[in-house]
Amino acid sequence: MVTSNKTELFDYLLIGLKEYLDREKRYPYPDLLRHGMNALSLEMKKSIPFPKTMNGFLPFVSEPVNNWCPKNFIPQEFDGDFGLIDEGSLSEEANYYLGELLESGGIPEYASAKIKQLAIDNQKFTRILEKFRDAYTEDNPEQAQQEYEIFRPFLIQHQYTTPRDIRQAFRRSKYLSVEEIGELYEECESNQNYWYCDRCGTLTEKYGRLKGLKPILCGNHTKNQSYVHQVKWETGLLLIKDGIHQRVCFPGIPELNLHSALEELQKEYSDYLKEVRLYPGVDRYDLQLRFSDGVLWAIDYKDVRDPYKLAKTLKPLYGEGSLRYDESFYVISDRCIKNHIDYIDIARKEAKALPYETHLVGDTTFRNRVNQKITELQKGGKV
């Protein structure tokens, strides 16, 4: 394994850590992790002693990367103010960077089969999304939108499913085959226990403990929790693949929760809240609300723990054609705000590309805004 690209060595280290943290056996260390550690130890500042054991190394790489990593190792796309590990899992920044690698196809040849499968899963979903968007712009936008509104929520709400359920949901689909959906899942084994969290999706069990994708956001998975469920095995049981869980399912759960709450409001106050659209324009943003005064709101939901990280991704929402809006909102999950009391203020200040007119609010605050809008419309006023 030879490379002269220093940032590739950083990739090796990060991917090797992912492989190490995800597996049951600790020895031998993954090849990429060993290679990354060796290269790092040779180039680190001499004033910073390199840890001699893995028990010392893991806390070491939990510190901000800028504190210990040579500058020529750190990719421009990685924010060095963050560490590689957070509470025993890859940090949010590391997961985000890994996601970018997966989408770009930049996975090293020596990565494990599991990491390569993550890249393949991401590519499969990207191809499906592109197929829907092509159909939306070039063929039949209404049908493409209707089918996408079935497809994406199905993945989020059916992280465990069966071939029968897939056939029933997609047998009449014009743009997707049952086989394409099936490729986003893997078969469950009859001798394994499977678990699910209402808040963050599929769980893994190690050493008798259940763990979700982002423990820092959803960490209490003791088996007696009301939101933790054991999934009963049946012949043909399928489990969503890890790459799809990370990219689609985990961020999609709070999106659909908000959508369900708004649909309930729409049913109760249909004279005022006229329409709630999910993933308009094949996911140009998450939700569009139409009120009785003709006002349109566009909403994109965010569940990113660190406000500084989120701020760098915030930009004006797409608003052309049928996706036009009068007001736009980035809605932040309450669990993120709960972990950081100044979350909204920090994100607003740091979001240099976000227009002042775009609202940045928490989930509960946004729901209150919708209720206030309905109340004003009932009074005959405008908001």
Image: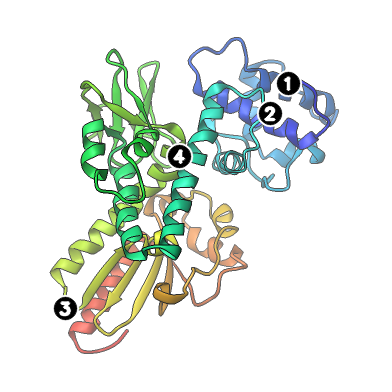
Q: Which residue is mark 2?
A: 12
Q: Quadrant of residue 100?
A: top right
In three-dimensional space, the C-alpha distance between marks 4 and 2, rounded to whole angstroms, equals 20 Å
Q: Amino acid at mark 2?
A: Tyr
Q: In the rendered structure, which disc, 2 or 3, sits on the residue that comes first in sequence? A: 2
Crowding near pointer 2: few (<14 within 10 Å), some, many (20+)? many
Q: Which residue is mark 4?
A: 246
On screen, residue 273 versus residue 288, left or right, reads: left
Q: Is residue 29 visible?
A: yes
Q: In the rendered structure, which disc, 1 or 4, sits on the residue that comes first in sequence? A: 1
Q: Which residue is mark 3?
A: 271
Q: In the rendered structure, which disc, 4 or 2, sits on the residue that comes first in sequence? A: 2
157 or 44: nearer the eye? Answer: 157
Q: Amino acid at mark 1?
A: His
Please identify the quadrant where the C terminus is shown.
Answer: bottom left
Residue drawn at x 31%, y 54% as measured from the top left: 147
Q: In the rendered structure, which disc, 3 or 4, sits on the residue that comes first in sequence? A: 4
On screen, residue 25 versus residue 380, left or right, reads: right
